[in-house]
């Protein structure tokens, strides 16, 4: 097909619908009606001579042809977006937008950003505290810092390992002094457990301790680890902490560790569409972050 005949509007509509697997979400993203999205995709399918979607009950799935086309279009549109962003950026002052898990942003990154600014005053960092993985499109961030089990947790992205998370119970010193002595992990049955995201963390820790009967213990549930940790510092219960995010609180005595046992529970990852095409500010920040984590006091504590 000649370039002059490429149906760019229809291709854009299909890419949004395929990426979201939803005509309605594509319509919201492109600020058009759902009927317009449907019409554009029907016209594109007619032009190609093959269906791009399987229309199922209340959902759609990509056909083999649709998957092949979506992969190429998403890569191409992202490349165009990155090139345009580089062209319009101010050469005298570089800006970098980073999407960061709220707990990592509040407990680790913010404490160290001034160090980055002093080293690289020409780079302005914009931090978006967001747990949902962004699409890396338009004005969204170029890099993301996310917590996950493995590097394949996020589709159509690349991920680099930053640091493993090793969890252990933490609580306020006053609560430890006034409560039942914590001689063994089994004594935690007498305390309120603070959960973040879901109850998997405590379940994993108790199973590792050989106490599966305590894995179902109830307690307040917080949508962010930083909130659970704030509740722990206020003496509301026992949370699962780690040396990276809670090292400063542990050193300051705001939190204490009743046990030495640590259990692996996922990792933090640096996520980007393509690490080979990072801007200079993004590459600089990435290298700096890796070095900061390598030298973090929490990693060498005993």
Image (spheres, rainbow, N blue to C red):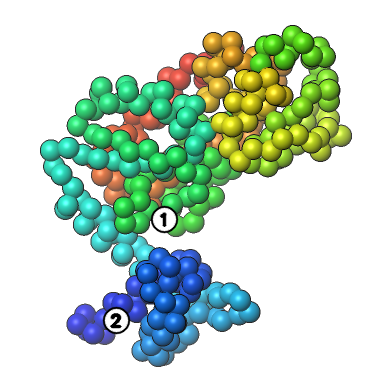
> In the rendered view, does 281 fall on the left or right side of 54?
left
Q: Position of residue 292 (x, y in %)?
A: 40, 24
Q: Residue at x 26, y 44 (%)?
A: 279
N-term-proximal mark, 1 vs 2: 2
Element type where label 2 sits in the image? loop
The residue beneath circle 2 is 7
Residue at x-position 77% and y-position 11%: 178
Residue 155 sits above or below residue 128 on the image: below
* Camera-nearest residue between 86 and 299: 86
Q: Residue 152, relative to residue 15: is it above or below?
A: above
Quarter of the figure with the N terminus:
bottom left
Using the rendered image of the protein, determine whether residue 160 is visible from the camera's viewpoint. no
Taking the spot 55% from the left edge, 74% from the top edge, the residue there is 61
Viewer-proximal residue, 247 or 155? 247
Residue 154: image x %, image y %?
Answer: 50, 52
User: Could you tell me how far apart the alpha carbons at marks 1 and 2 are, in whole angstroms?
Assistant: 23 Å
Expressed as whole percent of the image width and height from the top left, the position of residue 188 reads: 80, 23
Of the pair 300 and 196, the residue shown nearer to us: 196
Residue ranking furthest to the right: 213
Q: Which quadrant would the C terminus be assigned to in this image?
A: top right
Q: In the figure, is residue 28 to the left or right of 204? A: left
Tags 1 and 2 in contact by the CB under 8 Å rule?
A: no
Instruction: Identify the residue shown where x is 55% and y is 17%.
Output: 249
Q: Please tell me the numbered disc located at residue 135.
A: 1
Looking at the rendered structure, the number of numbered marks drawn on it comes to 2
Q: Position of residue 94 (x, y in %)?
A: 21, 39
For residue 59, the mark is: none
Where on the picture, by quarter, is residue 288? top left
View extreme (left): residue? 92
């Amino acid at each position: 097909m000649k370039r002059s005949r490429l149906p760019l509007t229809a291709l854009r509509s299909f890419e949004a619908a395929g990426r979201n697997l939803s005509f309605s979400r594509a319509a919201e993203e492109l600020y058009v009606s759902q009927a317009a999205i449907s019409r554009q995709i029907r016209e594109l399918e007619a032009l190609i001579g093959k269906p791009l979607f399987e229309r199922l009950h209340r959902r759609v799935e990509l056909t083999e042809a649709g998957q092949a086309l979506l992969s190429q279009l998403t890569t191409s549109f992202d490349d165009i977006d990155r090139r345009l962003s580089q062209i319009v950026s101010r050469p005298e002052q570089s800006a970098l937008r980073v999407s960061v898990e709220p707990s990592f942003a509040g407990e680790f990154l913010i404490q160290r950003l001034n160090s980055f600014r002093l080293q690289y005053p020409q780079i302005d960092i914009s931090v978006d505290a967001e747990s949902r993985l962004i699409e890396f499109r338009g004005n969204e961030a170029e890099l993301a810092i996310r917590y996950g089990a493995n590097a394949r947790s996020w589709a159509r992205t690349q991920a680099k390992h930053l640091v493993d998370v090793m969890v252990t119970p933490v609580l306020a010193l006053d609560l430890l002094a006034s409560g039942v002595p914590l001689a063994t992990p089994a004594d935690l049955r007498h305390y309120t457990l603070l959960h973040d995201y879901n109850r998997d963390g405590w379940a994993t820790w108790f199973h590792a301790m050989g106490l599966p009967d305590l894995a179902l213990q109830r307690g307040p549930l917080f949508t962010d680890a930083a909130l659970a940790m704030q509740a722990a510092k206020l003496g509301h219960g026992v949370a699962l902490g780690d040396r990276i995010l809670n090292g400063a609180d542990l050193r300051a005595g705001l939190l204490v560790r009743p046990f030495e046992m640590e259990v692996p529970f996922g990792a933090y990852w640096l996520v980007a569409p393509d690490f080979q095409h990072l801007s200079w500010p993004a590459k600089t920040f990435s290298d700096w972050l890796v070095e900061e984590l390598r030298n973090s006091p929490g990693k060498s504590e005993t």
